[in-house]
Amino acid sequence: MNTLDSPSGLPPKELEPTRQRILEAARAEFAAHGLAGARIDRIARTASASKERLYAYYRHKAELFSAVLELNLIEFARAVAQDAGASLPEFAGALYDHSVAHPEYLRMIDWANLEGRDVINPPLALIEDFHAERVRGVIALQADGSVDASWDPDHLNALVFGIVSCWIHEPAAALAADRAPDADTIAARRASVVRAVERLIG
């Protein structure tokens, strides 16, 4: 992706240490509090950086939010790329593993949806490239006969992501007092994700 297309101006490469610390601190802050509830002074303090240094990188809070969203998507795309050639159920299992290890990524997407594009500037080129790559992957699996060819690849791609993320949004799971499932629950949910996708494509 061209840096000029990036809302944060960040190329997908290693970042300067202070900037990296600011983004990591902002990721935790935004995931917990959203754009409106996040505090710049808290982000700067957590990152061991001055507010002046932070504003030298990002002119306002919404721009920092967009930069974190972009970094999340870059890291997510890299993490799942190694599983892109797997069967669709295996890929869904890998996506579920990633969502358990990095729940802040999905929370950031939820906050971004609530804020809307009139407030933040999402990295649309990156999102569209990743989506197109996943749809091409589904088409290839349909061509080799491992996925039911009657599915619209775009719809099937969305359904797989919906199955993977269902516990993030299912009320009993999302609003439970103890929001950290134990290892057995995580394993059982993963197995259900894989089984659901197996039945979906059969």
Image: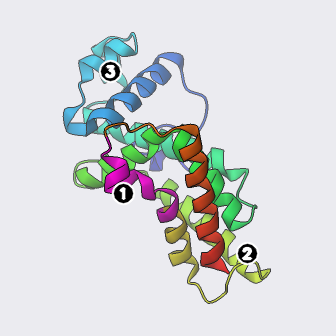
Label 3, label 2: how far apart the Cα atoms are:
44 Å
Mark yes or no: residue 112 visible: yes
Could you classify mark 1 by the number of other residues whose Cα lies within 10 Å: few (under 14), some (14-19), or many (20 or more)? few
Can residue 8 be seen?
A: no
Mark 3 Cα-neighbour bin, 10 Å: few <14, some 14–19, many ≥20: many
Judging by the rendered image, the residue that carries numbered circle 3 is 43
**Magenta-drawn stretch, dominant element (helix, strand or loop):** helix
Is tag 3's residue or tag 2's residue first in the polypeptide sequence? 3
**Sequence order check, earlier mark of 1 and 2:** 2
Element type at mark 2: helix
Magenta range: 162-176
Q: Which residue is mark 2?
A: 141
At x 44% / y 59%, what residue is drawn? 166
Horizontal side, residue 132 vs residue 123: left or right? right
Instruction: From the image, tell me which residue sits under label 1.
Output: 170
The one of 9 and 178 positioned closer to us in this rendering? 178
Which residue appears farthest toward the front when viewing the image? 184
Residue for point 64% across, 78% down? 201
Find the residue positioned furthest to the left.
36
Q: Secondary structure at mark 1?
A: loop
Quarter occupied by the C terminus: bottom right
Q: Residues within 10 Å of mark 2 (few under 14, many from 20)?
A: some
The residue at 40%/32% (across/down) is 27
State which tag comes first along the sequence, 1 or 3: 3
- Percent of width and height locating residue 123: 43, 51
